Image (cartoon, rainbow, N blue to C red):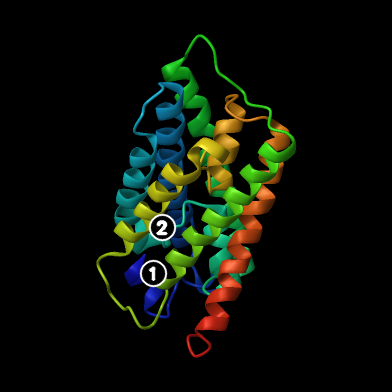
Amino acid sequence: MADVITRHAGIPRMSSMPWAVAGRTYAVEAIGAFFLVFTVAASVLSHSAFTPLAAGAVLMVMIYAGGHISGGHYNPAVTMAALVRGRIGLGQAVGYWVAQLVAGLVAGVVARAIVNPLTVPTPHLAGHALTAAVLAELLFTFALCYVVLNVATSKDQPGNAFFGLAIGFTVAAGAFAVGGISGGVFNPAVALGTTAVGLFAWTTFWLYVVAQLVAGAVAGLAFRVLNPDDK
């Protein structure tokens, strides 16, 4: 991600990107999103106490693995932030969103088939609990996207080696902090995959997705305001 996005090239513009290259970037996004969502869903379904660490770790390694090809978003909210920040075009963003969401849905189904617990709790949040969950998702999705833009797209940090660690630990910190409130999702692809297997109600899913995409857009705007010379 640092090499691909930081050096002002970002991801190649769709108008100049051969279809083979575009397909490769979408495939990398799908692979990264799949393993992120699969890790989260399998950890939760198997009642692992280390889900926050697992989520942060798999995101970190997948960013290091695929960042040089696709930018390593694996998250529609991050793609939204990159779009608003001006690092990718709308056509590319749509392609990324499709790849991420399809991979997330498949990952959730695969995790459910492998773990196959007898019961899957589906919390139905309402009132203050729902408001608190949406706010928690809004805040930490913003934090995640803000960190991504600053460590992986800033011209002041070209070629740094810590971008994956910073992004992965942001997810882990958020999951530890508000996982008990919102589930620590911070990613519409994760929301889709986990909702599809019954870990969230569909009414919660739509609210989460709106909050997460808004957070990504606000992070993109915040970066532009705070870094006016970094175009």
Q: Which residue is mark 2?
A: 72
- The residue lying at 47 percent from left, 86 percent from top is 230
Q: Secondary structure at mark 1?
A: helix
Q: Which mark is residue 152?
A: 1
Q: Residues within 10 Å of mark 2 (few under 14, many from 20)?
A: many
- The residue lying at 49 percent from left, 39 percent from top is 179
Mark toward the start of the polypeptide (2 vs 1): 2
- Residue 208 higher or lower than 5, as above or below: above
Camera-side mark, 2 or 1 = 1
Residue 210 shows up from this direction: yes
- The residue lying at 52 percent from left, 54 percent from top is 140
What amino acid type is highlighted by mark number 2?
A: Gly
Q: Secondary structure at mark 2?
A: loop
Residue 96 shows up from this direction: no
Residue 199 horizontal side relative to residue 43, left or right: right
Would you say the residues marked 2 and 1 are in contact, meaning their CB atoms lie under 8 Å apart? yes
Pick out the residue farthest to the front: 128
Q: Nearer the viewer, residue 195 or 21?
A: 195
